[in-house]
Image: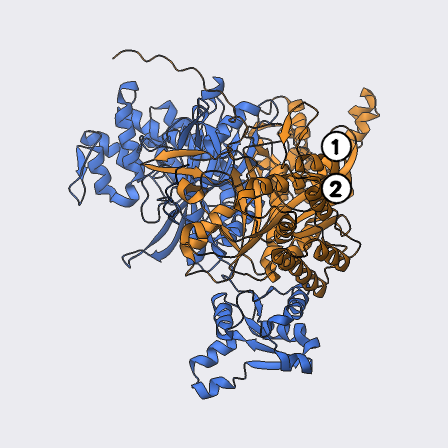
Chain colours: A orange, B blue
């Protein structure tokens, strides 16, 4: 047999655009998602975990975002079928509802949390696998379902740690916008492209300002880099109507509703839409969700093409510093709305649905900025190893600590160099090291080193002082647990 | 433009071998995993969540199980790179350790929980996506690391709800087996195939019994269907040595160790292995883990080829009834061992590692069989809708219930047919329905229907009695929350 050529070593790397999450990154996210799940459950929503893999046929191959029609999914062929990783939680929900509709309650309230995958160009802070956390109600035509999700969104934000006053849930209605388009002469199938451009232009109000949006409504806009984006080609009067819609927000919901009614005069769709907003406002008021938490805001349109009625988004209103050091509002962390066509793809039957998606990483970043995440990575108490032959004794100590509710571990590396053991404890962010050698065992004692205090002393001590640091105490072996507890309490941990 | 042919409707189906998880299936698993994570964390292990997608190069293309060398992964080509879904948690750990070894503590204790994907032929109860829950210690050559994982495994089982006495953690050592093979004349590179067959034969002791294993050690074995499996071709004397190893277990660990030392006499590897088992026993005794929880059992070999030292598995010893109605032990729910070569693939350097994997679905099934899972799906209180125009009032009720800690929802379907609302409440497994129409609103009252009691009465009542069932009471609107609480308490929920 010919000798096989030795294969080169594989590269130890995640694929481009993917990353790993370590320790507190995992547990903080998981804590936040548990809190969110509890709120959703409290509202009567049930968990659903779909398979990560779907047929391309069921998924629809591309993202529904009309801004990025060529962005795709990770797909492959398997025994003649094309399979793909889910790119969001909504497409699988539509498949599940179509598949199991006879067994599911109607309306069906469900929540879903987990990773989704997008075959997009990766960039800084932009990954090809990330978490989504969705709640949707399928089969409920009433805007009471939309109101409920807005209320739930407010509760969710407060539950995870965003104070009232630091967020606002904004509600709008696509029908109002469609009404405005009608009034502006943009109704009809032949104007679909223009309406798409208008929609996306409005969605960029935050970023481009009124001037930029106005340019996109007209001939088009050149950005700083010289790139030109073609506009909707609206005349001045038309553009003024659309711009008027975006600035229709008044001090109270009632005043905003009145202003919107004026703007959509003559359009039945538009009037319906405003009435729906009015109803949502009433329903929320009845539950005690007032304008300090949820408000009608006509500038919210949400980019996705598939929304058909109410749309909503949650914005965090506190300031953070952006990458250029300028203060700015934290911005949107969640959004959603009503969509009625997704299930129809499968069954031919239109099924009303409304739902919200929370940007998990954005919300985590917000909680981090507010100092609302549990303190990261307090390490375990480390029982060091002075005498390899006494491993059973060290294991007994560590078991005793653990049985008394204290996170603890024994040092399992090569014990020869004791300095390495302390370095290890340091790398583990360990609060305490337990030390015992032959002398201690003979005397029935154990040394306990307060690593937090030790680090503070070390900062201000000479080498001489360091040798006899008071941060280390000797206690009877039987007092191990009590002393460790006392020191941990003193460290506030 | 030519008219596009209308595409047929997509099928609403998961791909073959994949499934969805609903409601309590999701939350029960998630509760169990949280408890396991807490035990792992308590032992000083840190969470790690790797990307679901790896390069095929980093992953190694196939499963390391030599029994199924052709079983594969889900893989696809992306910009010239071959990517694949992870098939276990160990291969990604090896990649992570090789990639981040300079930043990670050594030893590195980590746990990982999540789905893995296998491109295998699906079958009943055999899915292509399932959960794994692993804990591994990388960089610790000492068998103290193996002992620690065995202790942690025992703690984990008790924490999730398996009583002491209902499980046993069995420990063995590959070196002992290798020693036995040496003694039986199966050492040397040219005997690798035979050793592999012996290993897999021993692993089937549970299923095939001694006769079946003996046949596989010799010429081979014909199963009931007539399929023939080629054996290792061992002579009688050789086979007797191997069989002696499998039945070497004695009443105490010390006696088993003594018996094993006899069996491996003349083999250094074998003697080392037995001494390691002895040390593991001592370390566990020192921590209070005695033979009622963890024992040395030479019949445990674990099928995977990559183990190099201690191997361990947890068996649940209580009886369940199998699909044919026969009582049998529940069997293995977890296993693992020491492997030293996985990181070497990347770095050229041998890194000692040991770890355990819990079969999440098996353990859940066991907890279910023991009645240890939280009661499934108690639904929300359903506030029904008698008068669509009063939706705000119903929403106010439901908000009040929720604000008082009661899971509740308003009926959001078409309210026209009231019977459908009660059917819905039934499908939701709802404990209580709240009912209010014009009369109730005028009188400041609300009807509260105990659906649990109602169902019991309905079983034993005629239609006449049913009409005026005492399970429904009228209370003042202001007493809504108090009365609902009282009824829930009476239902024991």
Q: Nearer the viewer, mark 1 or mark 2?
A: 1
* Picture residue at 31% right of the left edge, 46% below the top: B123
Q: For this rendering, which residue is in front, A135 or B269?
A: A135
Which residue is under mark 1? A322
Image quadrant in which you'd find residue B177:
top left
Q: Chain of mark 2?
A: A
- B145 above or below A28? above
Residue A286: percent from the left, percent from the top? 70, 66
Q: Nearer the viewer, residue B346 or B304?
A: B346
The residue at the far bottom in this view is B464
Q: Quadrant of the C terminus of chain B?
A: bottom right
Quadrant housing residue A104: bottom left
Q: Position of residue B353 (x, y in %)?
A: 49, 29
Q: Closer to the camera, B166 or B409?
A: B409
Q: Secondary structure at mark 1?
A: loop
The secondary structure type at the circle numbered 2 is: loop
| Circle 2 residue | A371
Characterize the local packing of mark 2: few (<14), some (14-19) or many (20 or more) Cα atoms within 10 angstroms.
few
């Amino acid at each position: 047999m010919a000798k096989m050529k030795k294969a080169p070593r594989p590269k130890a790397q995640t694929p481009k655009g993917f990353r790993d999450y370590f320790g507190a990154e995992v547990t903080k996210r998981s804590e936040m998602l548990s809190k969110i799940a509890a709120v959703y459950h409290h509202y009567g929503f049930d968990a659903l975990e779909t398979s990560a893999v779907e047929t391309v046929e069921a998924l629809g191959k591309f993202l529904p975002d009309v801004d990025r029609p060529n962005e795709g999914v990770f797909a492959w062929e398997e025994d003649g079928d094309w399979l793909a990783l889910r790119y969001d939680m909504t497409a699988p929900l539509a498949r599940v509802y179509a598949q199991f509709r006879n067994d599911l309650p109607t309306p069906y309230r469900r929540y879903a949390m987990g990773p989704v995958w997008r075959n997009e160009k990766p960039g800084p802070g932009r990954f090809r696998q990330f978490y989504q956390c969705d709640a949707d109600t399928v089969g409920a035509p009433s805007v009471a379902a939309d109101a409920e999700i807005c209320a739930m969104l407010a509760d969710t934000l407060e539950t995870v740690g965003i104070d009232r006053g630091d967020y606002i849930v904004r509600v709008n209605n696509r029908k109002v916008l469609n009404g405005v388009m009608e009034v502006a002469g943009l109704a009809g199938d032949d104007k679909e492209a223009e309406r798409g451009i208008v929609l996306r232009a409005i969605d960029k109000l935050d970023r481009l300002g009124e001037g930029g949006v106005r340019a996109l409504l007209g001939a088009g806009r050149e950005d700083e880099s010289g790139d030109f984006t073609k506009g909707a080609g609206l005349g001045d009067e038309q553009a003024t109507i659309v711009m008027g819609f975006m600035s229709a927000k008044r001090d109270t919901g009632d005043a905003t509703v009145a202003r919107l009614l004026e703007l959509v005069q003559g359009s039945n769709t538009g009037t319906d839409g405003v009435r729906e907003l009015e109803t949502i406002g009433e329903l929320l008021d009845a539950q005690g969700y007032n304008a300090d938490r949820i408000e009608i805001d006509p500038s919210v349109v949400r980019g996705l093409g598939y929304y058909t009625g109410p749309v909503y988004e949650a914005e965090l209103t506190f300031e953070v510093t952006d990458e250029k050091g300028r203060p700015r509002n934290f911005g949107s962390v969640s959004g959603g709305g009503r969509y009625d066509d997704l299930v129809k793809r499968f069954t031919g039957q239109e099924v009303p649905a409304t739902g919200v998606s929370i940007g998990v990483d954005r919300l985590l970043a917000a909680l981090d900025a507010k100092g609302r995440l549990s303190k990261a990575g307090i390490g375990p108490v480390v029982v060091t190893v002075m005498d390899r032959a006494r491993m059973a004794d060290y294991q007994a100590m560590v078991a005793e600590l653990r049985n008394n509710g204290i996170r603890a571990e024994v040092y399992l590396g090569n014990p020869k160099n004791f300095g390495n053991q302390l370095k290890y404890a340091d790398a583990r962010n360990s609060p305490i090291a337990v030390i015992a050698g032959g002398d201690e065992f003979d005397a029935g004692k154990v040394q306990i080193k307060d690593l937090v205090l030790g680090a503070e002393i070390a900062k201000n001590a000479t080498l001489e002082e360091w040798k006899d640091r008071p941060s280390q105490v000797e206690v009877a072996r039987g007092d191990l647990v009590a002393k460790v507890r006392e020191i941990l309490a003193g460290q506030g941990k």
